[in-house]
Amino acid sequence: MSITRRGFLESAVAASLATGLNAQNNNNNNNDGESSRRGKRPIIICAHNGVKYLDDAFAFLKNGGDTLDAALRVVKGPEDDPNDDSVGLGGLPNEEGVVELDACCMHGPTRRAGSVGGVRNIKNVSLVAKAVMEHTGHVMLVGEGAERFAVAMGFPRENLLTERSRKIWLLWKEQHSTDDWWGPGLADPHWEAPALPSTTPPTTAPHSELWQQRIQRLEERAAELGIEPEFRAAAVRRVLSPPTGTIHCSALNDKGEISGCTTTSGLAFKLPGRCGDSPIIGAGCYTDQDVGSAGATGSGEENIKVAGAHTIVENMRRGLSPLEAGMDALQRIVRNYNHDMNKLQFIDVVYFVLRKDGAYAGVSLWSGYSEKPHTIVVHDGTRRSEVTVSLFKGASHEFPPFPVAMPKELTKDSVYVK
Ligand code: ASP
């Protein structure tokens, strides 16, 4: 995929918006104008990794359960799951091999919020965010203070780094630089001198021999580290393109009460102390009982700069549909880079948008891989996955910009460990 021309950008945006508006009309089976479009209530929308927990949360909501508690039921599932390496237990760690988690929540009916950032050793940070909301006069706690608060509230301290995530981190640590002492040293029988500048080909282009060798070395090292064969390709891909991963969930009951929450282990191998958008009220999640709720996954730094979730809710307040509101936030990200596709190709954001009347939208900067497009999961009596409406067609490239083309066994599918 090579997209560099402004002209393409503009036509892609126009085409996406046109498709999107149709999609929304179809979703709502209603073509008679913005103001009269209604969704169904109750309804829950969330990221794809919440799908297994949606039936239970929907039944809870339908039986009169609180909207925030319903949303938390969804996101607690991946937090507890050691095989989901995007949140909670088993989340990929920071560059020092330590798992640091972020989360926030907003309760529409009581107009309250809670948030925690950079929390170590506590897996259910979404529930800690709720505890901050309910049991303190603050909105946000971070780092050691947040951990101590969680322990005081009865949350158990536990080691969040699973063996698989530790080994993936170690693989990353060993290969991400030749300028340190990590990885097999000179004395190792398999050590090979790195190519000197004079002998290095101009680039390690995709499919070049060097690149293939690099992947092969990583796979061999993954085997030596004891990463199971079925997870090796995924591990190598995570090392070459450190992934992001998060879950957002918004829930609306039949009375029109609405809440939202977002939880994450953030960007894999981030700098210690880095907080992304997920715990930032107004960026990773925002809920206003009068209007609706929105949340985000993807490039946190970019979403913070446009206060994405808040922007979307405010857009809906002034009459934009969920789809238009989300598209406008994406356009602001594009504007921040002056429409420069050379940079935008390394960014991706998905927005989950739910209006108080049950109308909703899932939008994304990029559509994703054709075999694995971005989706949102919806339950309004029927549970289903829906492809997002995207601003650009194709998949973003992860950052840092390693050569993009991967061998077959390293397709996007291998990103997901399960
Ligand atoms: N937005 C999250 C962050 O930047 C990561 C993600 O959604 O994948 O921390």
Image: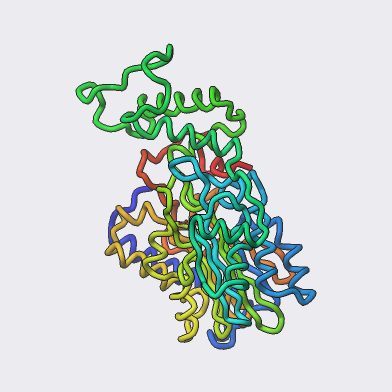
| Point 66% across, 76% down: residue | 252
Mark yes or no: residue 23 visible.
no
Residue 11 drawn above or below residue 180: below
Screen quadrant of the C terminus: top right
The image quarter in which residue 415 lies: top right
Does residue 201 appear to the left or right of 23 in the view shown?
left
Q: Position of residue 284 (x, y in %)?
A: 49, 65
The image quarter in which residue 25 lies: bottom right
The image quarter in which residue 417 lies: top right
| Point 24% across, 31% down: residue | 202
Q: How is the image coloured?
A: rainbow
Q: Nearer the viewer, residue 155 or 96?
A: 155
| Point 59% across, 71% down: residue | 260
Outermost residue to the top: 189
Q: Position of residue 368 (x, y in %)?
A: 49, 53
Does residue 394 appear to the left or right of 382 in the view shown?
left
Does residue 42 appear to the left or right of 177 in the view shown?
right
| Point 57% across, 72% down: residue | 136
Number of marks in the image?
0
Q: Nearer the viewer, residue 379 or 279?
A: 279
Q: Position of residue 335 (x, y in %)?
A: 31, 67
Outermost residue to the right: 63
Outermost residue to the left: 198
Mark yes or no: residue 237 visible.
yes
Q: Nearer the viewer, residue 280 or 152?
A: 152
Q: Position of residue 274 (x, y in %)?
A: 42, 54
Q: Nearer the viewer, residue 176 or 10?
A: 176
